[in-house]
Amino acid sequence: MARYGSDNRRLVVGLAVGALVFSALAASGALTTISRPVTRAFLTLAGPLHGAGAAMSGWFGRLAAGCDPEDWRGKYEELKTEQAKLLALAAENASLKEAVAYRETAGTNVVTARVVNESGDDYSRAIIIDRGSADGLVVGQPAITGNGIIVGKIIDVGANSAVIQPLTDSRSRLAVTVQNTQETIGVLEGERGLGLIISLIPQAETVLEGDTVITSGLEPGIPRGLTVGIVGKVTASTQDPFQTASIQPFKASLHPTYVQVVRTTATER
Amino acid sequence: MLFEFFIVLAAVVLSLVESSFLSALPPGWNFTPSLILIIGLIAVFRFRTALIAAAAAGFVADAVTSTFVGPHLVSALVTAGAGWWLFTRVFANPTLPSFLAMNASVFAVHRSLAYLVRTAGDSLTVGAVSPPWPSLATFEALLLQLLAAAAALAIARSARRFLAARFIFSGHAA
């Protein structure tokens, strides 16, 4: 047993010394001619094995990611938030671009204001903007969006804020013209915050579905030609001397993010 | 001699799998099957063969993973020496728990040496700092190592039983 242990000790020492000498020679580059082909041979064998391992590792990674639904839910929510932010920014950008374009065509007589709040219920709505009398806003001025689509009229003004009554508000009234052959004029009324109607149109006037409705310019402070909407359904009765047209407002005018208030001069008012 | 040849061949294959396939897997899968072979040889009193197998495995690991031959070879030989010391002084009782305990101890020695080698290599070459040791992945790998060791032992015992049965049967037939 002692002999056996002694032999082993000798072997251990021999191998350790041999390994150190071998390592030193290899590190100095003396064994390059021998080690290079050997290394290359082993690397040739190791390459496909490493590739298989890497592929399996990727599979494990995907499996681990796929196993945790909370991870996917978190990522989904994150992406949805990002998407919402991007959509809001895109809408804001488009709105501002349109406002700039309108300002260029209408001159400098408009004030761009940001919508800070929309309040009220379906029957009575109000849009609050961040500009007021300090910017030259007065009651009765029209607020428009995009390329001249009227949103409503100012009904109250503070120093740095103003309240706009949307056209769809039940108390709203606006003098309009239908762009038909007879240039039918009428009064546009809000319908419980949902839609718009023009009532009291004489039976003799021909109002067709799809006609565009614009402001008539007959109302003080409201210039002619601001777009209101499109004629939807026309209701006429043989016993009634007047017909009623429902008007579909433009989508852009319903929940604007930016509006422009057309500042009218004292004479215009 | 033929036995030694097959053992060296097995050590080379296991080391190749370990250094290329298992090293590409997540850290928790980096167990060392070549160590199981070395410990198995020590456990059946074949220390010389274990040393030769360790040298072969270390050499292959160096050839595949290092730019120069040395660190893995030396650490494999030192690990085999540590395994022999543990077998003669601590885990002399040849039972499954002692075999597994020896595997765990030698695995820890091997990992410590590998960590030292890697840290030294990092500081000499790129100046990088190695991740802390032991990590959770080390324990995962240790668990796999023990499972593999138990499986290897079971396979070895089944093979011995099968061969013994065949030998007895052919003896009766003769």
Image (cartoon, coloured by chain):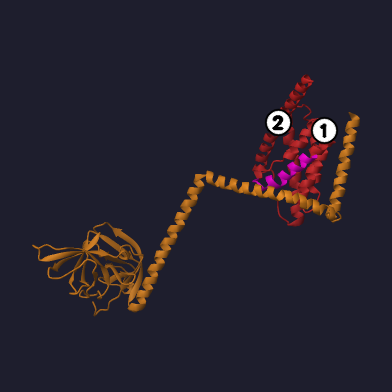
Q: Main secondary structure of the magenta part?
A: helix
Q: Chain of mark 1?
A: B
Residue drawn at point x = 44 percent, y = 61 percent: A86
Disc 2 marks a residue whose amino acid type is Ile
Q: Quadrant of residue A98?
A: bottom left
Q: Is residue A159 magenta?
A: no
Q: Colour of chain A?
A: orange
Q: Are marks 2 and 1 on the same chain?
A: yes
Task: Kindly identify which residue carries mark 1.
Answer: B46
Q: Give the residues drawn in magenta, as a range.
A: B8-26
Whether B6 is drawn above or below A74: the answer is above
Whether residue A134 sits left or right of residue A238 in the image: it is: right
Q: Colour of chain B?
A: red
Q: Nearer the viewer, residue A128 or A182?
A: A182
**CB within 8 Å, label 2 to label 1:** no
Classify mark 2: residues with Cα within 10 Å, few (<14), some (14-19) or many (20+): few
Whether residue B166 sits left or right of residue A159 in the image: it is: right
Task: Kindly identify which residue carries mark 2.
Answer: B155
Mark pair 2, 1: CA separation:
19 Å
Classify mark 1: residues with Cα within 10 Å, few (<14), some (14-19) or many (20+): some
Residue drawn at point x = 39 percent, y = 71 percent: A97
Residue drawn at point x = 35 percent, y = 74 percent: A102
Q: Nearer the viewer, residue A171 or A77?
A: A77
